[in-house]
Image (tube, coloured by chain):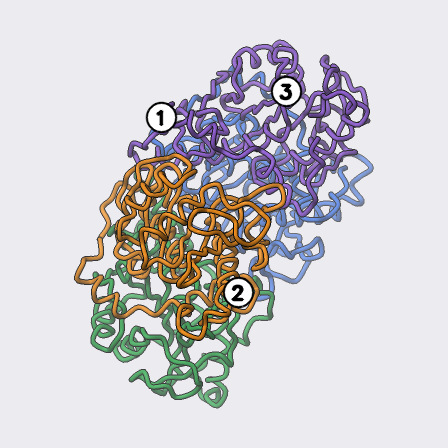
Chain colours: A orange, B purple, C blue, D green
Amino acid sequence: MAGQPGHSPTSEAQLRELVATAGRILYQQGLTDYLGHCSARVPGTDRVVIKPKHSKTVRSPGELGPDDMIVIDLDGNLIEGSDAPPSECSIHTEIYRARPDVQAVVHTHQRAATLLGIIGAELLPVLHVPAVLTDGGTMPTWQCPLLVTGPELGRKLAAALGTAGLCHLQGHGIVSVAADIRRAAVTAVALEQLAEANLTILQTGLSPRVITPGELDELRSAVASIDGRWAYYVQLLGEQPAPVF
Amino acid sequence: MAGQPGHSPTSEAQLRELVATAGRILYQQGLTDYLGHCSARVPGTDRVVIKPKHSKTVRSPGELGPDDMIVIDLDGNLIEGSDAPPSECSIHTEIYRARPDVQAVVHTHQRAATLLGIIGAELLPVLHVPAVLTDGGTMPTWQCPLLVTGPELGRKLAAALGTAGLCHLQGHGIVSVAADIRRAAVTAVALEQLAEANLTILQTGLSPRVITPGELDELRSAVASIDGRWAYYVQLLGEQPAPVF
Amino acid sequence: MAGQPGHSPTSEAQLRELVATAGRILYQQGLTDYLGHCSARVPGTDRVVIKPKHSKTVRSPGELGPDDMIVIDLDGNLIEGSDAPPSECSIHTEIYRARPDVQAVVHTHQRAATLLGIIGAELLPVLHVPAVLTDGGTMPTWQCPLLVTGPELGRKLAAALGTAGLCHLQGHGIVSVAADIRRAAVTAVALEQLAEANLTILQTGLSPRVITPGELDELRSAVASIDGRWAYYVQLLGEQPAPVF
Amino acid sequence: MAGQPGHSPTSEAQLRELVATAGRILYQQGLTDYLGHCSARVPGTDRVVIKPKHSKTVRSPGELGPDDMIVIDLDGNLIEGSDAPPSECSIHTEIYRARPDVQAVVHTHQRAATLLGIIGAELLPVLHVPAVLTDGGTMPTWQCPLLVTGPELGRKLAAALGTAGLCHLQGHGIVSVAADIRRAAVTAVALEQLAEANLTILQTGLSPRVITPGELDELRSAVASIDGRWAYYVQLLGEQPAPVF
């Protein structure tokens, strides 16, 4: 892990690579347009590597690389880089403050998951791999469509997220958090697949067979690690995977 | 703004660039095929820069550049260029006559918004950014599927539009109007996203959480300007953005 | 028209070009895979230019050119070319026998129109341009899912078609017939757009505003000719349009 | 057939080519991402040619060729190659044990068919070609969403499959089995088309016209062989078809 002894001198550079790659993956998978942003906490610090705010010069996440990422502190101050932080950087900073276990935050407006949140429908664990990756479909809802333009709203969002890995920002989008930016991004992709399945099922009016808690326990111990999944999405970008550390 | 003193000598050339680019964006975003057209009023004049009528030689809007645009007057007479004006140019001219505040008109047959108009369903503001860009989903309907082949029908359409920024042409398509061609085009894209969300929600039979008027007021003051959004869509065309003036 | 005096010496070559292009357009527009076929009658003869049967060597219609087309007579005998005629060539020959006004037949398995036929739902004229191109949505259904492997079934299909321009082959696909292969192909594209709209509307459970017969009459006299529409689809193939004669 | 006398010396190499091509086709057709796998039994042996497990180095099936395939025995032991077998290789080995007639197994998580299984809806034979290719829509369901991580679960799956060609793995995906890898793969594609049609029809709430058993019998004798269908999908990969033997 990036936070292990001896790795800290290079970890910020590695995180720039990983955060930019996560942003490109989410874009390539159709989960984002110019909106949304990924970040990672530099282990053991108050520094956060994050995509800058979209603007006339900062546009498609599909074209952004490690050097385009910026660094902010937990008050949202710009520490490295010249582009502005996202106006919603409090999404990231307040989750990092509230959740020491979280090292990465992904925020998207991904279509299916956002719609499921808008209609208040449960994210039923109907597909086995996405069910495991989304922790059995556990996904609270923050019932506020406002832009998260400051720490107060960020704290409310963090409270709604609680100890979960995913949260609906109702009428807005979602957050996916994890101890690893690769996992937070892959989970967002799995969430979209599961949400799309739920929407389609709702449209048929029929009841799905839901995977049971006992089955989920068995599945958790059986599904493969995140490494192959991340490598696959990276390959779709036409590049070598970022070094795993 | 293009209409500011000192900019008028170049403004028509700039508008040709912007109108052609708006047409390419709408085409690239899948909102148009060969049908539909964008226009902009040359500030302080009765001249309108507009895409010509589709024909054997005027085909994909994705391939049209500034020099392909034509100029008409408010009676629909061809002032510059050799290709014919759209047979529905009264959509544009009569809106310009009725609405001095409007400097740009976009007309498309975009799928989701058109379908929502056909079934008479409200464009509910369920997604925060598109809700703001479409003025809270305010969208009257002109209950007439005829081609707007002359000034009389154009005046009826303008009356149905009233003071709004968007209007359904029921069984036909939509218009998006603004003081800026960039805004009119970006709004059409946001409308399609919001209409698609509404259609999907209707298909589930569930009730969405609608963004409240009070929340919309807060959102209006918080969302970013049109500049970054336009720059993003331009980047997708693989070109530099038109100069903003 | 190809059948006009003085043009007959070159018409078969021109029809090969048009039939191959129509097949490429339908493929490019996603209305066909390896199944389906277009044909045109050589004016004043019993000869029919048609795409050959798909096989190990005759595969994607997107790759077939004029020289790949074959010629059959109205008994389905191969007159020119070495590849076999489609096993369903009676779709074409029996319609040509029954309908002297028909010079072109398009047969596809296009998704939305076929599904609408399977559920027996009416093709409501809800979108104005497609409504006109599909003659107000007039579309009888042949309630037979069998392959049209001989003249007897072909005659039954022709009887179900009657004097219409479109017919459902229930559980199978559709035919689109016209005096011009360009019109038959463009109509198939418009049909798919209209059928998709009808399916989506059915999924919402809401009632659409249907274009009235009187409005359709007005629209018929106002919509543009087929030329610009064909030229647009040809442009999407990245080629010059076939010469119009 | 690969199992015919005189062909056995080359059959394993041919099967590597066919299994890799089937995997590329399923990927190109959108039926798989990094998950899912195809296999073929080497005729007259206990050897199975199969795609290896996805990992950091074994990623997109779209990029895997004959040399990437591995060989396992019916106990799942790696016989040739260095990459690990899929963790679910018991899907394949236990079906081969239970079904001497089966020479090829395809396992996917294809969207529409999997969703149809989750809601327990019947795969109605509403489209004639896919109806024949899927044996009239005959498709039992194995009501278990667990990963098939060992022979015991594999045997249960094989029992649920019975003598059918297709089976739902509820909450998971499907299997398609045949005497020929080309047929198993083409059937999976046809299944997806038929399942998508069924889902869309369910969303309209209307009743489809179902192809009758008598009609299916007539259709079975009329539809073309698998050869042209396989050749078409291979062409989409931009390559020559594997030699048919």
Residue receiving disc 1 = B212
Mark pair 1, 3: CA separation: 43 Å
Q: Is residue D148 left or right of residue A43?
A: left
Q: Nearer the viewer, residue D164 or B88?
A: B88
Q: Which residue is mark 3?
A: C222
| Image quarter in which the C terminus of chain B is found | top right
As helix, strand or loop, the secondary structure at mark 1 comes to loop
Is disc 3 surrounded by few (<14), some (14 to 19) or many (20+) residues within 10 Å? some
Chain at tag 2:
A
Q: For the residues carrying marks 3 and 2, which lies nearer the camera in this image?
A: 2
Q: Tell me the residue at 42%/36% (across/down).
A: A147
Q: Chain of mark 1?
A: B
| Residue B231, picture quadrant | top right
**Which one is in front in this view, the residue at disc 1 or the one at disc 3?**
1
Q: Return the residue found at the far left.
A: A214
Separation of residues labelled 2 and 1 (CA atoms): 43 Å
Residue D189 in view here: no
Position of residue C86 measured from the top left corner of the image (x, y, whole percent): 55, 55
Tell me if mark 2 has few (under 14), some (14-19) or many (20+) residues whose alpha carbon lies within 10 angstroms of its own. Answer: some
Between residues A192 and D212, which one lies in front from this camera angle? A192
Q: Is residue B43 above or below residue A126?
A: above
Closer to the eye: label 2 or 1? 2
Relative height, residue A185 to residue C159 (above, below): below
Q: Which mark is residue D243?
A: none
Question: Which amino acid type is shown beneath numbered disc 1?
Answer: Thr
Marker disc for residue A13: 2
> Quick one: A196 or D5, which is closer to the camera?
A196
**Residue type, numbered disc 2:** Ala
